[in-house]
Amino acid sequence: MAVYFFDTSALVKRYVAEIGSPWVEGITDPASGNRIEILTITAVEVTSSVARRVNNGTLTTSQRDAIITQFRNDRDTQYRSADVTPTLVEEAMTQAERHALRGYDAIQLAGALLTNRERIANNLPPLTLVSSDVELNTAAQAEGLHVEDPNNYP
């Protein structure tokens, strides 16, 4: 079983057709046997991303509602969510300073790093960060994480 830590830029591709959506759908399909890790705040970001598409005309309100309902179900049944803790915030501050990341990108990176460190400490294979954010991916690679960008799989 592979473990993937998804940031919002990648996870939203499961719900909205974008470059890389078929690749994301394959990894997140429960039949794949993969474990999907997210931060609890990713739920807010995915919901926001989907809702904002109504304003720009790329989704109807009924499409938005169906997507958000599906996402909520998947969040509750298929994803393992980690909370934002004081330790995670401290790590995010370190990563924001080190790599000049935007706030939520630093939080996502901190979440992936802490989850990965916990896996390694328990003699488990490392995880893979899945993100479509170039700056986040560059910082994650500099921190030693394996990274996959769904945009590389059109």
Image: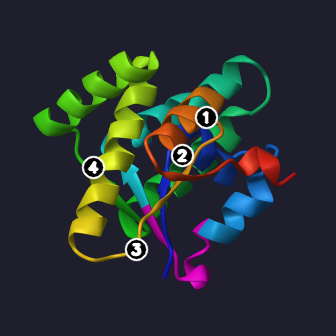
Please, is residue 53 above or below residue 66 in the view? above
Q: Which of marks 2 and 1 is nearer the N terminus?
A: 1
The residue that mark 3 highlights is 125
The image shows residue 41 at horizontal and vertical percentages of 35, 37
Q: Which of marks 4 and 3 is nearer the N terminus?
A: 4
| Front position among marks 2 and 4 | 4
Q: What element carries label 3?
A: loop
- Disc 4/disc 3 C-alpha distance (Å): 14 Å
- Disc 3/disc 2 C-alpha distance (Å): 32 Å
Bounds of the magenta segment? 28-36
Q: What residue type is labelled 3?
A: Pro
Labels 2 and 4 touching (C-beta < 8 A): no
The residue that mark 4 highlights is 114
Picture residue at 48% right of the left edge, 51% below the top: 145
The residue that mark 2 highlights is 68
| Front position among marks 3 and 2 | 3
- Disc 1/disc 3 C-alpha distance (Å): 33 Å
**Looking at this view, is 130 or 71 the one in front?**
130
Q: Earlier in the sequence, mark 1 or mark 3?
A: 1
Q: Which amino acid does label 2 sit on?
A: Ile
